[in-house]
Image (tube, rainbow, N blue to C red):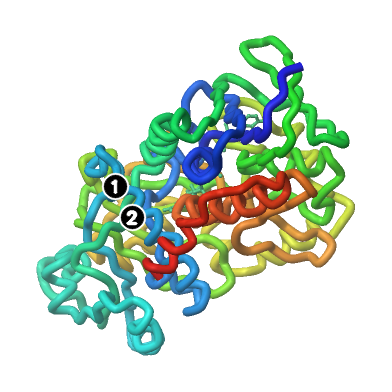
Amino acid sequence: MKKIDIAIVGAGVSGTALYYALSKYVKNISLLLLDKRSEIAAGNSRATNNSQTLHAGEIETNYDYQKALKLRAGALSLRQYCMSLPNREEVIHSMPKMVLAVGDEEINHLQERYKEFKEGFPRLQWLEWEDIRKIEPQVAHKDGYRRPDVIAAMGYKESYSAINYGLLAKSFVSQSKLLQEKNGIDSEIFLNARLIDIKKNQEGYTLLIKRYGLIEKMHCKFLVTASGAYSLYMAHKLGLAEDYSLLSAGGNFYFSSLALRGKVYTIQQKGLPFAAVHGDADITQDRRTRFGPTLLPLPKMERYIDGGYRDYLQCVKIKSKFPSTMFSLLGNPIIRRYALYDMPFGKNLFVRQVRKIIPDMRLKHLTFAKGFGGSRPLLVNHVKGKLVFGETKITQDSAIFNVAPATGASTCLNVAMNDLKYIVQALDLSYDDSFEHENLALA
Ligand SMILES: Cc1cc2nc3c(=O)[nH]c(=O)nc-3n(C[C@H](O)[C@H](O)[C@H](O)COP(=O)(O)OP(=O)(O)OC[C@H]3O[C@@H](n4cnc5c(N)ncnc54)[C@H](O)[C@@H]3O)c2cc1C
């Protein structure tokens, strides 16, 4: 049986970021990166499956200041990485970015936030109607005149705020290749290779992998799953995280013929782990504007892959507080409204929401973005009856099971650095700790 030091399951942004971090900062190890799909970043990290936003926490109004500073640190290190790439113009894009407040109540709330956030985000600007008009004319007008409701925003006229996360993941792999020989790293990448079972033993884990229809066994000293919903599935297989059930929250988008130049977010409700409807210039579609995401609960593990229903049922504990948590979530009027957007009449409701951003928006301006939008793996603590917010890291002595959150692509490098520290400690490896100083310099 082939033996390796560290196996990473899942080649989205999370898995590839860790692959890169290990290739850069650790020496003389063997690595395996595997994914069941035939391409790097074909899951939620594919550019068409997410909103492409580099979240820094200031315009996501469900983040408080302290949480936003943490998100910002992650966003800064990712931006710095992207700017160092030879193909950076394809990977990271600059555009306007703002959060829009409509009506006096929202404006007062945003003004308070601006005062609090200004120090930690020195480039952040307060934008009055006149400023918004220059940046996003569609937002400022209705029927050719100044829109009747009062608006203000905070944001940036230009900011590196959009990333093609699919290309980012591919860059992590290609940059790793450049580092591995120098650092004595022996590495393999298996695509079309599905982890189907894990057994823990004294020296680590035995992995059962199905590759091109053939089953093979491998042994690793340390295992990391960065496999979205399947990270929970794998943790359950080892008897871990048994308090958690899975809520697969798909998200759809609409393209609009009325265009934005950049990203316009709206004020979010505190405590909801997904963004309120926003408009984004799509960097893979000649900056056509995409609105969304909606919220479509799915009884399966992933989107655009047949099956997965049985695996999903294994991730849900029906005889627990899971059903009642779902009912109470549906009791929240915002979630209920979101869930209706994907019903047959949903576009009529969705367009009203989008009018908050572009008042002239009509049904005829919106086209369903078929094949766009992934599925957020949200965890429910079915013992406490609560939705779990943020990144979930389930650990065992020599394994980490990561379930990335709604902003997970933006924080992938930071999460990878933290995982690296955990791994080197568990395996008693030495590492180059210069990145800790780099991060401090950016903070
Ligand atoms: C609608 C939507 C909008 C979003 N917008 C943003 C945004 O604007 N900004 C942001 O930062 N984040 C956003 N996110 C979140 C972001 O997309 C994810 O957090 C991120 O892509 C997660 O990356 P990942 O590598 O953990 O997962 P994925 O990219 O999903 O990769 C997981 C990989 O694991 C593989 N895998 C699964 N099971 C197995 C197995 N058994 N064996 C082998 N391989 C396996 C899959 O094939 C897949 O390639 C959004 C998500 C959604 C759904």
Side (left or right) of 273 relative to 393: left
Cβ of mark 2 under 8 Å from ligand 1: the answer is: no
How far across and how far down the image is residue 84, in percent? 29, 47
Depicted 173 relative to depicted 64: above or below: above
Depicted 441 relative to depicted 345: above or below: below
* Residue at x 18%, y 79% (from the top left corner): 129
Depicted 14 relative to depicted 272: above or below: above
Q: Point out which mark residue 84 bears.
A: 1
Depicted 430 relative to depicted 193: above or below: below
* Residue at x 32%, y 68% (from the top left corner): 356
How far across and how far down the image is residue 221, in percent? 74, 35
- The quadrant of the rendering that contains the N terminus is top right
Identify which residue, 403 or 205, lies in the foreground.
205
Side (left or right) of 36 relative to 165: right
Compute the Cα span from label 2 to label 1. Answer: 6 Å
Q: Amino acid at mark 2?
A: Gln
Circle 1 — which element?
A: loop
Q: Are marks 2 and 1 in contact (CB under 8 Å)?
A: yes
- Residue 261 sits in which quadrant? bottom left
Cβ of mark 1 under 8 Å from ligand 1: the answer is: no
Side (left or right) of 365 relative to 422: left
- The quadrant of the rendering that contains the C terminus is bottom left
How far across and how far down the image is residue 238, in percent? 84, 40
Identify which residue, 55 or 83, lies in the foreground.
83
* Residue at x 82%, y 56% (from the top left corner): 243
Q: Point out which mark residue 80 bears.
A: 2
